[in-house]
Each structure stands twice: as structure tokens, then as C-alpha cells.
Image (cartoon, helix red, strand yellow):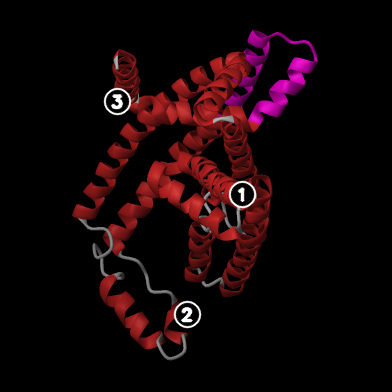
Amino acid sequence: MPWDTQRVARVALIIAIAVVSVWMLWRFLPALAWAGVLAIATWPLREALARRGLGKTAIASLLTLLLAFLLILPLIAFGIRAARESGAIMQWVGEVRQNGLGTPGWLAHLPLVGGAVSGWWQANLAPPGALLGHAETSGVFTLTRTLGVQVVHRLTILVFTLLALFFLYRDGGRLTEEASAIAERLFGPPGSQLGKDAVAAVRGAVNGLVLVGLAEGVLLGIAYVATGLSHAALLGLLTAMLATVPFGAPVIFGACALYLLVQSHTTAAIALFVFGVLVTFVADHFVRPLLIGSSTRLPFLWVLLSIFGGLESFGLVGLFLGPAIISILIAIWREGAASRANAA
């Protein structure tokens, strides 16, 4: 009986410490999760450098600086470009507020609905102040201040992510061995395999989401140049960022096609929209499921559910945590089914 009491007390203490630790570190969990995702995705590079004889601290410093450069430089470039364009944007806002948004000439020529749509545009968007009144303009400034606070918060998360990433690169091998030993002690031999499945799922999600998103950004960036859009490089960067989320790229190329349509460049708008739909359809329905599913042995449906479920539950980092969690669930399911079949 005393042994049972001590065991219960020990388990209760472990659970209490774990709960308090999660509560205390709650605001830093996104940084730790991102550091884990980046470390897993780039671990083969870390192993390649280790085979060349570099020390752990040197490898950690080199890779952390490299990722910091790759992560921060686009943000700086985007911030500089946004600052340059903010004056033109505010000037456009002032002009629209004073003069209204003119009705495109082609709108009235649309079949069946042209007259109704043109009339609605003239009544609701063309009059001065109809689209951007004083209330809307103040809302824009409020939104700008909110975005500024969010930027500071994201930069703080980025700093702690890079700090955690350094220690993961330096001590990741030892941490992996300790985690594998604990998992095997708690769950038996399958516990170690579950960890390997989770790592493979995260690496597959990075390849399927980030690399494919960058490819979509490059292809659509070329399309932006071909259709004569200004700031094609910035639009390509935004497309690549949103393309990491399945079906996210249409937000950018759809808006660009609409802009071309408003400017009466109908052929270019249709061509851009059709090309964008083709690129995203192939990427989201074939390339991504192939890259993620092949590394995790997840069916296509579970790949999509894990991506969108993770995004809904954990935010952007859930794009990578979702496949890892579902891969563990599927592995447990298969292990249970195999055990039942062997017992029969």
C-alpha cells in the first residue's frame, strides 16, 4: 500500500509540474514549436556539417545565423517596400474618398448583369466618400496601429525562436536520445517509432508546404511580370507566403486579376486567373499530398484534414504540427489493428 501511495503521489506531482510549466511558458510555446519545426526540417544539414568535423557550438551558431538571415531579410525588404508604398496608398485613399471610385467602362457591357452591376457601382462606389468615408479611414489607422503591435509581438516570438533553435542545434542529439528513451519506457518499443513518425511528418510538411509555396510564388511572380503588373516581386513574395497554406495563393492572384479587370485589361486578367488556378490546382491536389503523404504514409484525405485542422487549432505552426499529430494517431491505429490481427 505505501508503494502504491508513493506511486500515485509521484504521478500527481509530475502532472502538476507539467501543467504549471505549460501555463508558465504558454506565451513562449509558439516560439518553441517553431524552433522544433525548423530544427527538424534542417537537421540533415546539421548532420552533414557534423560529419565534416565542425563542433556542436560552431554548427549551432552557423545554422542559427543562416536561418536568421533567411527569415529576417525578407521581412526587412517587405517592411522597406511597404514603407515606400504607404505614401502612395494613403494618397489613393484620399483621392477615392474625395472623388469616389470611377465606374469601369467595360462593366456595363457584361452580358445579362452589366446594367445592374454598373448601376450598383455608380450608386455605392462612385459617389465621393461612399467607399472610404471618415469612419472607414479612421478604421484604417486603427488597423495600422493594431498591426504595429502584432509586428512587435511576432518579432519577439522570432527572437525566442532563434534562441531556442540555437540550443536545439547544439543539444538536439542528446535531447532526441533522452526523448526516445522516455517514450520507450512509457509506451514500450512502439513509443520510439511514434517519435520517428512525428519527425518524418514535420519534415514532409515543410517540404510539401514551404517548398511548394515558394515554387508557386516564383511561377505566379513570372505571371505577374508577363501581365504587366507593377511590384511583381513583392506580389510574388506575398503569393509565396500565402501559398504555404493550401488554397491561399488565390487570394493574391485573384485580387491581381480583379485589378487588371478593373483596369480594362480583360485578356491579361483572364490569363492570369486561369494560370493561377492551374498552378494551385496541381500544387494542392497532387504535389503537396504526394510530398507529405509519402513521408508519413497518410492518405490524401488525412493530409488535407491534418493541415487545415492544425491551422485552425494552432495557427500557422499548426500547418506542421497537424500532420505530425495525425501521423501518430494513424500509427497507433495501425499498431492496434496489427496486434489484433496477430492475436487472432
The magenta segment is: 42-71
Residue on which the image places disc 1: 338
Please provide percent x and percent y for residue 49. Answer: 75, 18
Would you say residue 75 sits in the magenta stretch? no
Q: Say above or below: 165 vs 334.
A: above
Q: Earlier in the sequence, mark 3 or mark 1?
A: 3
Q: Which residue is under mark 3?
A: 23
* Disc marking residue 237: none
- Work out whether residue 42 or residue 303 is closer to the camera in this orientation and state it: 303
Binning the other alpha carbons within 10 Å of mark 1 as few (below 14), some (14 to 19) or many (20 upward) gives few
Q: In which quarter of the view is residue 27 placed?
A: top left
What residue is shown at x 33% (from left), y 75% (from top)? 121
Amino acid at pointer 2 = Trp
Residue 203 quadrant: top right
Q: Amino acid at mark 1?
A: Ala
Which mark lies nearer to you, 2 or 3?
Answer: 3
Please report whichever mark, 2 or 3, sits nearer to the chain's N-terminal start.
Answer: 3
Tell me the crowding category of disc 3: few under 14, some 14 to 19, or many 20 or more residues within 10 angstroms, Cα based.
few
Q: Residue furthest left?
A: 135
* Disc 2 target residue: 106
Q: Amino acid at mark 3?
A: Trp
Comparing 263 with 217, the one in front is 217
Above or below, 22 against 277 in this view is above
Q: Secondary structure at mark 2?
A: helix
User: In which quadrant will I find the N terminus?
Assistant: top left
Decide if residue 174 is on the left or right side of residue 112: right
Residue 301 is situated, as x and y percent measured from the top left of the image, at 55, 60
Q: Are marks 3 and 1 in contact (CB under 8 Å)?
A: no
Q: Residue furthest bottom?
A: 112
